[in-house]
Structures are given as structure tokens and as C-alpha cells.
Image: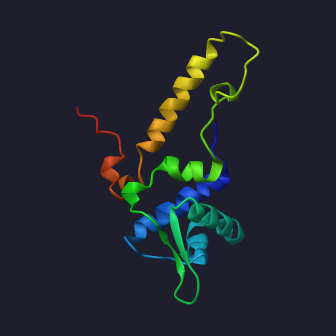
Amino acid sequence: MQITRQADYAVRAILYLAQLGVNQKASTSQIAEDQEIPLSFLAKIIAQLSVAGLLQTMRGARGGVLLARSPEEITLLDVVEAIDGPILLNECVSGEYECPMHECPMRTVWSAAQADLVERLRATNFAQFLRPNLIQPAAIKP
């Protein structure tokens, strides 16, 4: 599974804004330039993140984009699902799909892997990236 380029850009934009600090805004063009994201593509992503309640946008000379919630309240899952929709490793896990392979043993594996991924993304918020010691693996002691 690979997230879309759009979701990757969305994560980068949210992280950029989180790094600016609370209630700090940036222009879409500044985010696009600093994060090397095509401006027209980023504008669409910003609109989706705004609709999802993750960003606030303000028009005008003093306008810009800022986080709608604190970095602690925005998870990787929120951002990825705002752009790509619900995580789905295999259509048999959706519950709406009727698999022609009755009693297939793989559904259990796909379901568990999907649940693990969703939980990992849900447990990871953007404040953690502002405090690197929280996301780095524990140091190996001699």
C-alpha cells in the first residue's frame, strides 16, 4: 500500500504549519515554495483539508492558512483519510464486499494489518514531530 502523492503533500503542509507554532499562518504560495509542492495542486489539497476541519483559510492581504486544531489534535490518520478516504488494504475488509472465496483465511490477516495501520496513524499526532524524542526509537544501550 502506498498513500497518494496528494496525501503526502497534505501531511507535509500540515507539518509545515505545525512547525510555525500556534495560530501562525502562512500563504499557500509560501507553503508550496518551501515544501516544493506545485501551487495549483496544493490549493486543491488546502481546500480538502479545510473542508475536513483541519485547516482554516483566510482571504485577503492579511489572509493565509493555519491549523484549525492544535497539532496534538491532528493525527496522521485525519490527514490521510481527509485526502484518500478510509484506509482499505483489500476490498474484502470493507464489509460491503462479498468474496467469492468463502472462508478465505486471508481476510483475517488483511483485517488485522489494516487495524494495526489505522491504529498507528491514529496514535501519531503532529505534536510528536515537533518533539523528535517522542518519535525516535529508543537508543540501544551497550
Instruction: Tell me the quadrant of the picture where the N terminus can be found.
Output: top right
Q: Quadrant of residue 64?
A: bottom right
Using the image, determine if residue 139 lies above or below residue 100. Answer: below
Q: Residue furthest bottom?
A: 61
Q: How many marks?
A: 0
Q: Quadrant of residue 51?
A: bottom right
Using the image, determine if residue 15 lies above or below residue 138. Answer: below
> Relative to 83, is 127 on the left or the right?
left
Q: Position of residue 91 (x, y in %)?
A: 69, 29
Q: Residue furthest left?
A: 142
Using the image, determine if residue 100 lies above or below residue 127. Answer: above
> Relative to 121, is 38 on the left or the right?
right
Q: Residue at x 58, y 61 (%)?
A: 49
Q: Residue at x 40, y 43 (%)?
A: 123
Which sits in the foreground, 80 or 93? Answer: 93
Q: Residue furthest top?
A: 103
One can see residue 37 in this view: no
Instruction: Tell me the quadrant of the picture where the C terminus can be found.
Output: top left
Q: Position of residue 7 (x, y in %)?
A: 61, 53
Q: Residue furthest front?
A: 96
Q: Position of residue 96 (x, y in %)?
A: 69, 29
Q: Position of residue 27 (x, y in %)?
A: 56, 78
One can see residue 112 in this view: yes
Which sits in the foreground, 140 or 49? Answer: 49
Q: Residue at x 58, y 48 (%)?
A: 81
Which sits in the foreground, 17 or 73? Answer: 73
Q: How is the image coloured?
A: rainbow
Q: Residue at x 63, y 27 (%)?
A: 93
